[in-house]
Amino acid sequence: MTEPAVKLINLRKQYNGFVAVDNVNLEINRGEIFGLLGPNGAGKTTTISMILGLVQPTRGDVIVDGYSVRRNPVEVRRRIGFLAENPGFYEGMTAYENLMLTARLNGVKDARRRIGEAVRQVGLADWLYEEVGKFSRGMKQRLGIADALIKDAKVLVLDEPTSGIDPRGAEEILELIRQLSKQNGITVIMSSHLLHQVEVICDKVAIMNRGRIIASGTLKDLIGDRQLVTVEVDNITSEAVEKLRKLGNVSQEQGRITVEAHSDIRHEVAKILYESRVLVKGLSVSHPRLYEIYRDLVS
């Protein structure tokens, strides 16, 4: 069995009595796009800092590509690329000069060729000799990905990679992330509050709250057998709503009522509404989206 690209083992970080990360265990497979989610203060940033080897755990360990962050932090850093929400490049230098600096700091051999390949892959070949200060936010994100490619990172950690980018630019960044994962075999760990993008691109997710992982797996794993029965109605009575609440969680909007349950309850919903003389204009069944799962877990 192939070893995971990243493994968190009983990971804990404590600051003067405050527990920021509490006994986290997690495995992220090679070539996987993994979403790390949670509200502000959940422990995501501290967890990422420990994965990057920037913060030492109070207890436990992180294994990246077979290397322990406790015993071999330098080797771990060589294998990880990090793209911050606001990438830190020298804006008075060209893209080439910034990338060559990274190559020299990391002892990259054949740096010119590697830089050329990286900028072609991220779509910045025509901008290689332009100053980074002229770049849009999306172009700087692409340059950050190129920065990781030239050091041949096995794991790429992305913090809000599409924040502040227009919809078309965001989709281009997401497609580039897909290519890195599927074609280059790079493992991607992505932290984002844009859950609709996480839902589209990530193979698996973990949701953190108060320093702990409260759920992890594929979206299908997290949904389980939950179903949403949504009914469009003309006149809903309080009596009918109370009967529906016995079937599951009920939410209401103007002209619409939704019942969430762990089985197919369409027949029961229709029967209650018919007996309550509620005019039904339409009925549909769907599954919860990632946002709804996230909301329910962290609230």
Image (cartoon, helix red, strand yellow):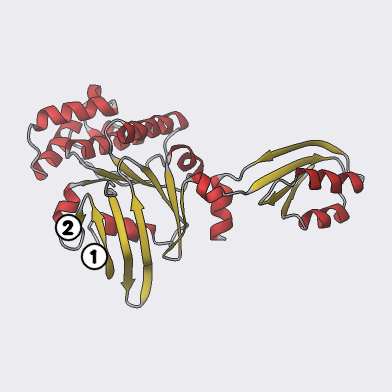
The residue under label 2 is 73
**Residue 136 at least partly seen:** no
**Residue 217 at least partly seen:** yes
Instruction: Look at label 2 and name its amino acid.
Output: Pro
The residue under label 1 is 56
Q: Secondary structure at mark 1?
A: loop
Q: Nearer the viewer, residue 287 or 252?
A: 287
Is 146 located above or below residue 289 in the figure?
above
Q: Which residue: 12% across, 36% down?
A: 100
Instruction: Look at label 1 and name its amino acid.
Output: Gln
Neighbor class of circle 2 (other Cα within 10 Å; few <14, some 14-19, many 20+) is many
Q: Are marks 2 and 1 in contact (CB under 8 Å)?
A: yes
Q: Which residue: 28% across, 70% down?
A: 59
Q: Nearer the viewer, residue 274 or 189?
A: 274
Please indicate whether residue 272 sits to the left or right of residue 287 in the image: right
- State the CA–CA distance, disc 2 to disc 1: 9 Å
Residue 187 appears at what percent x and percent y? 30, 42
